Amino acid sequence: MTVKRIIVAGLSATSLVFATALTSAAGQYGPGASDTEVKIGNTMPYSGPASAYGIIGKTEAAYFTMINEQGGINGRKVNFISRDDGYSPPKTVELVRKMVEQDQVLFLFSTLGTPTNTAIHSYLNDNKVPQLFVATGADQWNDPEHFPWTMGLIPSYGTEAHIYARYILKHLANAKIAVLYQNDDFGKDYLNGLRDGLGEKAANMIVATQSYETTDPTVDSQVVALQGSGADVLLTVAIPKFAAQAIRKVYDIGWKPTHFLTSVSNSVGTVMKSAGPEKGVGIISAAFAKDPTDPQWQGAPEYKEWLAFMKKYNASANLGDVQGAIGYTYAQTMIAVLKACSNNLTRENVMKQAASLHDVAMPMLLPGVTLSTSATDFAPIKQMQLERFDGTTWMLFGEVMSASGS
């Protein structure tokens, strides 16, 4: 080889190394990601029957605004596109298609609702678009074998129902159980989880069920029918609007069952206040996040930090609504994943990092509740603790539990 050829070869090698370094510095990107931004899509029921959950989307947007003011994630600003689907699956499909095909978002994040997420589940997986940390606890989100682009966040409805079943079997062994549930996968997951948790005793213990549609004006007639069954235990599986109606009706007709209320509808600031706090005294629910109305947290640094954030960036929010703490946790989890992605912001790497969480503790999660995922486990939070409403706040009791045990 001549000196000239050696020099040229050396220059070519140097150029290749330099070009590789530039590519690495610039990053690897999927749609919606660049050197300057990460585009994230979201649907939320800011209107319609489930509008009480809108605080989640508003809190997430506020958190991303704060992050952007602080310089973004790895120098990139979060472009959070959040649109109102009214808890209507056809509207969700329309909005999500637009975000994927026109807005070119990198992924969908915290889309709320079981029926709405079910409507976009196959579309997003077929197109290999991450459907990350969906804001619903339906059991179907933990199925990485068949739906590798979808991941939940909150405890599954089946897990929560199992925890109630364990309590009933231990403390209410002769219970006659009635169930009020929403007539979709959200409601049916709880009902099926309760049956599974009760095991062979379910057939005798569950004496009545009544379903409702989200288009129903009230659930009053269903509650009266359930009372007529002679049940002395009631599980209410409802979104906030109907949960408040059920609490109110149970009290007004003088029915005094041991009442279990699903965690997705136990907000003090919305559901319990709307029902009438005195009407919910004694109701049992479950929690995975710190309730802002619980005095035991209000002196803690993490609560004070959350409160300062809410007052500055989400000032119109109801500070008594635990969904504000949950939305905060959703956003923090998403930011942690984006940080882990570094300069590799492809859809594949976003899913890889989301599936690589190991005992991650978030400030507003209960002590003992952490996030863990793997390539075969898409259920980040698996623990909850029982709580009882005292007319002012939810009082935690017992140990932190999972579906299988403490």
Image: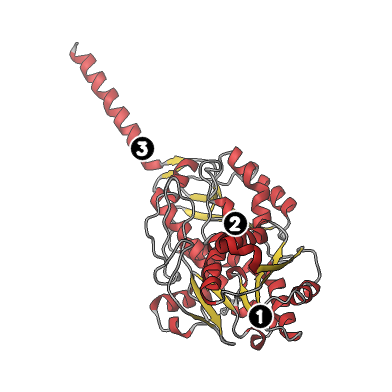
Whole-percent x and y of residue 59?
A: 56, 67
Residue 337 in the image: state x and y as whole percent. Answer: 43, 53
| Residue depicted at 64% across the width and 56% down the height | 114
> N-terminal of the two: label 3 or label 1?
3
From this viewpoint, is residue 156 visible?
A: yes
Return the residue at label 2: 138
Q: Secondary structure at mark 3?
A: helix
Q: Residues within 10 Å of mark 3 (few under 14, many from 20)?
A: few
Q: Which mark is residue 257?
A: 1
Mark 3 or mark 1, which is nearer to you? 1
Point out the frontmost of discs 2 and 1. 1
Residue type for callout 1:
Pro
Q: Secondary structure at mark 2?
A: loop
Mark 1: give few (<14), some (14-19) or many (20+) Cα within 10 Å. Answer: many
Specify the quadrant of the image occupied by residue 61.
bottom right
Structural distance between the alpha carbons of marks 3 and 1: 67 Å
Query: Where's the C terminus, which quadrant?
Result: bottom left
Depicted 225 relative to depicted 106: above or below? below
Distance (Cα) linking label 2 and label 3: 43 Å
Q: Residue at x 60, y 68 (%)?
A: 264
* Closest to the observer, 199 or 134: 199
In the picture of the structure, the residue carrying the numbered disc 3 is 22
